[in-house]
Amino acid sequence: MTRIAVSRFELTAKIPPGDSFWPKFNASFQNVDYDTNEIMDAIYAGVPVTTWHKDNWRTSANYICGQHLALDFDTENEQATIPYLAKDKFISKYAAFIHTTISHKPEAPRARVFFLLDTPIMQAKNYTLAAAALLWLYGTADRQCKDAVRFFYGAPDCTMHRIGSILPLDVVKKLITNYQESGQTEKRHATRRDYIAPPSQHEVADALRFIPAWGIDYDEWVQVLMGIHAAFGEDGRELAESWADGKPGEVAQKWNSFHATGNVAGAVTVATVFGVAKKYGWRKVEL
């Protein structure tokens, strides 16, 4: 069972900003314990959901706990379709379900991935951090999804794809650690006076030879791809493909999700690639 708060309203459209209905809506949530099918049924009926909160009022100060995380993919292209997202390695392993959102149109697809945790997160700051870490892993997701009491609209008569998995809190904690460490690493490099030159593809390829693509965790695998992308953009795709050894289409799927200007959620650069490579014995050759 999952701790989740459900609204007493079934909505068929988004509430306009400044609408007089907002106060009534923010006071409409009830804390419940639902199984996966009950959550899916509520969303299919158009019921908005959020985290548990107290005093009958949805605000961060009233947060009690959260046992779900969700990501909205609103790019209105193939990357926001259920078949595309369902093939993602992390999503296929840990997500509970995927559904088209209330704003979805066949010609402009939008989808949401729901993750249900095995253990509730009891502090609002930790919930926000978990959501931010998940966003770091998926740079194309809607960045508003990291609010501790952010609600998610239901989607009447939406298309549902049930995966049925659970996201362990231990995996979330590890993801948070990697997210925080990547930010600290890049901050240190950005302030070092002797941090000089962007590397060549030859140098990065040399480092990649030491990193076992199938011998590292998935989130670290993604970080390496992000680092290559941050350094070389589209010019680095062939290098990434040759190293990553992914399933057909897997590397392209992840690569296409990265922002053209870098991953704004996590500040991953090519320094991450070198950091991972050093753990496996790589050392920079000084010329």
Image (cartoon, rainbow, N blue to C red):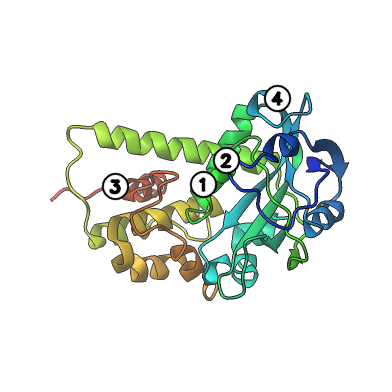
Contact between marks 3 and 4 (CB within 8 A): the answer is no
Disc sitting over residue 146 in the figure: 2
Find the distance from the CA under tag 3 to the CA under tag 4. 50 Å
User: What is the secondary structure assignment of the residue under circle 4?
Assistant: helix
Residue assigned mark 3: 283
User: What is the secondary structure assignment of the residue under circle 1?
Assistant: helix
Amino acid type of the residue that numbered disc 3 sits on in the rendered structure: Arg
Determine which quarter of the picture holds residue 229. Answer: bottom left
- Image point 79% across, 43% down: which residue? 7
> Counting other residues with Cα less than 10 Å from the Cα at mark 3, is it few (<14), some (14-19), or many (20 or more)?
some
- Residue 270 in the image: state x and y as whole percent: 32, 50
Vertical placement of residue 210 versus 160, above or below? above
Residue assigned mark 1: 143
Nearest to viewer (mark 3 / mark 1): 1
Seen in the image, is 187 located left or right of residue 39? left
Seen in the image, is 165 located left or right of residue 283? right
Residue 175 appears in view: no
Q: Earlier in the sequence, mark 3 or mark 2?
A: 2
Quadrant assignment for the N terminus: top right
Find the distance from the CA under tag 2 to the CA under tag 1. 6 Å
Q: Nearer the viewer, residue 258 or 170?
A: 258
Seen in the image, is 229 located left or right of residue 147? left
Q: Earlier in the sequence, mark 3 or mark 1?
A: 1
- Residue 280 in the image: state x and y as whole percent: 41, 49
Find the distance from the CA under tag 3 to the CA under tag 2. 38 Å
Amino acid type of the residue that numbered disc 1 sits on in the rendered structure: Arg
Residue assigned mark 4: 62
